[in-house]
Amino acid sequence: MNNWHIFGHDWAVRYLQQGIANQRVRHAYLIVGTPNIGKHLLAHTFASALNCTAPDVTMRPCGECRSCRLMKSGNHPDMLYGELDPVSGALKIDAVRAVISKLMMKPYEARYRIAIFEDFDHAADRTQDAMLKTLEEPPAHAILILLANSLEALLPTILSRSQIIHLRPVSTETLRDVLMREYGASDDQATHLAHFSGGRIGWAISALQNPEVLDQRAKALDLFEQILVGNRRVRFDIAEGLSKDKDKLALYPLLELWLTYWRDILHTLSGNTTSICNIDRLNAIAQFAHNLSAEDVLKAIKITQTTLSQLSANINLRLRLEVTFLDYPYIR
């Protein structure tokens, strides 16, 4: 398993490795999990293993054969990617059709032609429909790997024709150990990042290597606190500011982060402080918990989840955010 260099998702790695070893590879995989949990790395490592030419199947991907080197460079001729729209950030039907047409061709040099589609849950229904014929009658050489944050927006026909792999949040203990052992984090760094990440190992590694990630997190949490203590005018102004970003999906990680804060408040109300993610905001969390009821928090969580689920739809973003923020409780 170590040659995959994937930590915290051991069962998923074992499952995919066994499929390769037993020559029981499916034509479509759907890897599901919250952003930065490791979907991208698992998909690309799996693709590398599928086309690796190492004689020992247990050593794939070897990282040394021609196929592995081409994968590392991003120039493998049999790897295809669905390009996201630069304006909306969503996968468009033309991009799907372009990839599918190439997927039908025989591989140039590998065992398989492999197509990876990121953020597939943000694709419109008609875009997902464009995938169905390939899922129903796939060429023997073709493998589709779809990545999604959740299953809610995916068509039942997509789900029924894909092997679904759910990636769960990595435990705080495991993440802390990985950060220290594999990435050289100090005890204090590893502890804080393991909590902050909410089990998203990709985010934790990124934050360790790039301090700007932590700066962005701090600003996002400051904004959240401003909303809770702010009046209606403040909330409208923040909604207006956030809605100016043309890429609606850029709000996804922001709202996901705010959900961790809401859950921290809920954990504090229930006395379960060991599960808190944002351990650098303990005083503020305790203050909010003192002024809110569990009903207030559960309502806020629900409205935030609703907004998250609608980001890929054709909505008036400013209005949606205004409704969300006005439904948040006010801290007097």
Image (cartoon, grey):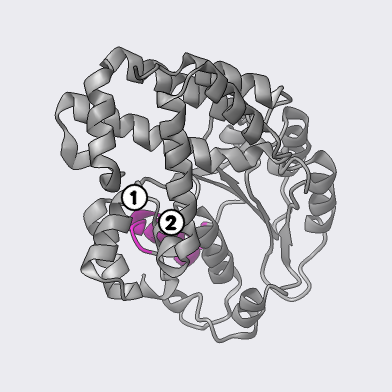
Residue 3, given in percent of the width and then of the height, sits at: 41, 75
Identify the amino acid type marked 1.
Phe
Q: Nearer the viewer, residue 5 or 172?
A: 172
**Quadrant holding the C terminus:** top left
Does residue 224 show up?
Answer: yes
Q: Residue at x 58, y 80 (%)?
A: 53
Kindly indicate the quadrant of the structure image that contains residue 58: bottom left
Kindly indicate the quadrant of the structure image that contains residue 190: bottom left
Q: Which secondary structure, mark 1? A: helix
Tag shown at residue 214: 2
Q: In terms of sequence position, does the residue under pointer 2 or pointer 1 come before the other?
A: 1
Q: Residue at x 49, y 52 (%)?
A: 216
Does residue 276 show up?
Answer: no
Marks 2 & 1, CB-CB < 8 Å contact? yes
Q: Is residue 21 inside the magenta stretch?
A: yes
How dense is the environment of label 1, judged by Cα within 10 Å: few (below 14), some, or many (20 and up)?
A: many
| Residue range highlighted in magenta | 7-24
Residue 227, given in percent of the width and then of the height, sits at: 46, 27
Residue 170, given in percent of the width and then of the height, sits at: 32, 51
Residue 180, given in percent of the width and then of the height, sits at: 27, 71
Identify the amino acid type marked 2.
Leu
Q: How many numbered callouts?
A: 2
Kindly indicate the quadrant of the structure image that contains residue 263: top left
* Vertical relation: 70 (above or below) 85: below
* Vertical relation: 91 (above or below) 173: above
Q: Main secondary structure of the magenta part?
A: helix
Q: Which residue is mark 1?
A: 196
Q: Residue at x 37, y 60 (%)?
A: 14
